[in-house]
Amino acid sequence: MKGTAELLKEHELKVTPQRLKIISMLEKHGHINIEDLYQEMLKEFPSVSLATIYKNINQMIENGLIQEVKLPQAKSVYELIKDPHLHMVCDRCHKVEDIVIGVEKIIEEAENLSGYKIEESFITLRGICPECQAKSR
Ligand SMILES: [Zn+2]
Ligand SMILES: [Zn+2]
């Protein structure tokens, strides 16, 4: 795995302590919403503002390092850009998980059917995760 600072430099982003922290949070949690990220950031940077975090996040999105994952009925989460994948969201515990599946095939077929050149996709599946299924038994 690449170093965090290297990752920033690769995406032409200045290496700052806050950006390093944001990336390490994304690596730790996989997906995180802005509120949770803000709460975590406050522990290390007590004077950081939500606006500053948004600014950093947006800059990192612009430079192709992270992406926003739009979720049905929940706040967006952010994640580091990785191989194409779908998101599974649990209706009970609201966790977000990646599932690596042939998204390219779906997109290719959608392009063929619609004639669109698809540039972005947010495919999310909702359901009950195995842990919550076990709990309700
Ligand atoms: Zn669950
Ligand atoms: Zn994801």
Image (cartoon, rainbow, N blue to C red):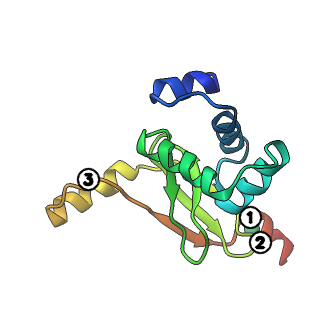
Q: Quadrant of residue 93?
A: bottom right
Q: Position of residue 66 (x, y in %)?
A: 51, 44
Left or right: residue 65 compared with residue 135:
left
Give the answer, above or below, for where 133 lies relative to 68: below
Q: Tag 2, which secondary structure? A: helix
Total numbered badges shown on the rendered structure: 3
Relative horizontal placement of residue 36, taking residue 9 as reference (left or right):
right
Determine which quarter of the picture holds residue 114.
bottom left
The residue tagged 1 is 130
Residue name at image x 79 percent, y 44 percent: 45
Quarter that holds the N terminus: top right
| Left or right relative to 43: residue 34 | left
Tag 2 near tag 1, CB within 8 Å: yes
84 or 137, which is in the foreground?
84
Q: CB at mark 1 closer than 8 A to ligand 1?
A: yes
Question: Type of residue at label 3?
Answer: Glu
- Sequence-wise, the earlier of marks 3 and 2 is 3
Residue ID for mark 3: 108
Between 30 and 58, the residue placed more toward the observer is 58
Indicate the amino acid at tag 2: Gln
**Residue 1 is at least partly visible in this image:** no
